[in-house]
Amino acid sequence: MSQDATQDDLHQLILGFDRKSTEAVHDEAALANPMFSQVPRLEQEGETKKEAATDIGKLIQQATTPDEVQSVVVGGICQRFAMFTACPVEDISPDVSMESFGLDSLVAIELKNYLVRTFEATLQTSEVLDAPNIVSLAKTIILRSKLVSQNTEGSVVEKEDVVLVEKPLEPAVENAVAVANHNFHCCRASKTLNKMPLFDFDTMFDEYLDRSRMFFSPEEFESIERDVAEFRKPGSTGRKLYNRLYEEANDPEIENWQEKYFLQSMYLQRRMPLAPFNNFMAFHPLGEMGHTQAERAALIASIAFQCKQDLEADRWEPMAYMFTANCTDLWQYIFNSARLPGVPLDRMAKFRGNDYMAVLHRGHIFKVMLKDGEENVSAEALIKIFSAILGRPDTDENWTSILSADDRTSWAENRQALMDLEPTNKETIDMVEAAAFLVCLDDTEPTEAEDRIRDIMMLKGFNRWVDKSIAFVVCKNATSGTYVEHTCIDAMTLFAMQTAIVQGINTYEPPRQVNGHTNGVVEVPKEFTLKTTPALEERILHVRQRFEDEIAKFGYRDIVLSEFGKDILLDRHLPIKGIFDLMCLLANYYYYGYNAQSWEAISMSHYHKGRPDIVQVNTPTTAHFCTIADDESLPAHKRFELMLEAANDRNQTIKDAFGGRCYQRTLRALELCVEEGEELPDLFKNPLYEQTVEPNQMFSNTDGLSPESCFIMQNPERFWMTYYVTDGGSHFSVITGKKEVVAWADCLQRASLVMKTLIDAA
């Protein structure tokens, strides 16, 4: 404050802001507040990016010859490449291969987004990286750009060029099917069926030892090396176990050798409760439309049902990850599915058809139809139905559904006891399990990220039925998210549906005459009841107490960093994912005081029926950087070089894992294929072995579609985190013990400042 202001007793600061600065700090509450609705979007006020796109559009429209059109497009691409690679535009040759630019995966995504926006053309990231050169990429863009007139387009690209630039990952499914040499519809975007590879025996154990060595003393590691050597001997039990996996991997009748081991060991045989330690949550943005609870619930239900219909009509396009087509086998479990408890194994069940949803409010259960004859029930009609459910007077709480959050053996027994007790109980359970999805209407009103996690994932376990594949939770203030049973659904499985929901939230404005209230009389849908016994009521109290005791150990932190983001890293030609992943390892180093193991989940959905694997990502190269990151006895430029080397090493680890070089799931499968009467190999009995394959920390980066996400590991000393990168910073969701999460958040902030210092030194 100035001296004059102090003398005049003025103590207020006025700070300017715009919509982009508010979005950069993820202030969704402000963005959703009608008071700020007049803050202009940059796109409406002549944002620089839009102006640039407009300039290119004008140049294309002014072009009079095909060569001029191609020149404009090539020039626009070269300019963007120059910015992303920190090179003068004259040094960007349109004829050199894309590999020569060394694009990081997140950088490539940013480039694709720019090209789509600027040239108004459909494009996939894989097409950017796989194009022979910029000229070929330009021809692809010209073929699809809405800015290029049909008359000009035909003369710019010859037929043989189309063959050159078109890829099997084109959105049109027919193209993919026409060239596929297999009959698996889930992999229709892949010409060849990519079966899950089996990691080579000796290579796997070499890598296992290399990645584990630095975390043990020489004396400790000697016992692991001894047991591995015994496992690898010719004729050993270990070799016999591997040969069983090898036969399964090469059996043409087995679609994926890993499937039964993964599904059984990770999910169906586990007896622990699904909540809070198996299911996960992906939150929706608040949006800017000011929805009521009924409006948000109706919007989500309407979109989800349309997604179900599109999926069943085969209108969903194949998707890709890391520039490779994905298997979509898990899509079948999104709707009308449930994990049914059993002994000794649970089982997955699919209930096709059934165009209705089950709605839970204060633990009471209702059936709501999603079709009226041949027509879908409109969002406006659903608003009235949800309003009627919410408007019931003096509704008490019903806790019976929390029995589904019991351990799986107890829930299997009590589920059967409920069905045997009353026919209406069986009718209710059958209805819920066969529903397309659930909608859970909560009475909480969380406003901040920590509140959302606490109220929706960590608050007593009330008003849920945890066996259902998906449930949409909608709070009183319209905060919402997708609650997922993990057994047959991974995060990427939901991408199409989540994208549609997010788009709807950001654009749907309900008719104001409805305004979340009923016009005329709307009957409350039929309530489906569950009758209990004193023994069941006692078990309900037990499950409630167990849930509260377990969840009380955990804490969540929503960490928003602003030291650097995409813009700075792109400007300096640094690998975005590699830098942020390395920052997490540095935070771990500060937290533990030493280099600890760290694991990342890797999608394997580019293989037929592939499920995520995990890879230990802290290597000697990354560990060395962590030890010298803030050592000022080394020049900053030298530490920067080591940082870049470590970031690239970190990226290479992920690329290798993506190609099937992951040992954890294979080792677990070797354990599971030991037959009755066979002696367990010494390696699996070694007390140190479990430390080499059971993660204490899991993290991954996301696309930011969900502002926060949540998965709770069973031990409060273990960490689970996701992050996404914004233009100006990054956003981390972290769950671990209550004290641990605060300490790790401080370490992450410290690591961010150190990394920023080194980035600036470049």
Image (cartoon, rainbow, N blue to C red):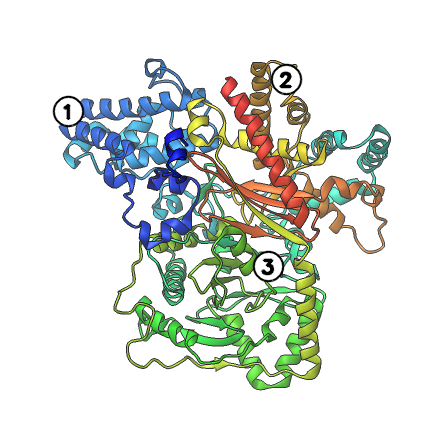
The earlier-in-sequence mark between 1 and 2 is 1
- Spot occupied by residue 530 in the image (x, y as percentages of width and height): 57, 81
Q: Residue at x 34, y 69 (%)?
A: 516
Q: Is residue 683 visible?
A: yes
The earlier-in-sequence mark between 3 and 2 is 3
* Callout 1: SS: loop
Compared with residue 369, is residue 458 higher up or lower down, i.e. above or below?
above
The earlier-in-sequence mark between 1 and 3 is 1
Q: Which residue is denoted by mark 1 in the rendering?
A: 65
Please name whichever residue, 35 or 565, is drawn nearer the observer in this view of the structure: 35
* Callout 3: SS: loop
- Spot occupied by residue 215 in the image (x, y as percentages of width and height): 76, 32
- Spot occupied by residue 404 in the image (x, y as percentages of width and height): 62, 69
Total labels: the figure holds 3
Q: Which residue is denoted by mark 3 in the rendering?
A: 458
Q: Hey, what amino acid is under mark 1?
A: Thr
Q: Which residue is denoted by mark 2 in the rendering?
A: 632
* Callout 2: SS: loop
Q: Neighbour class for label 3 at 10 Å: few (<14), some, many (≥20)?
A: many
Please name whichever residue, 458 or 382, is drawn nearer the observer in this view of the structure: 458
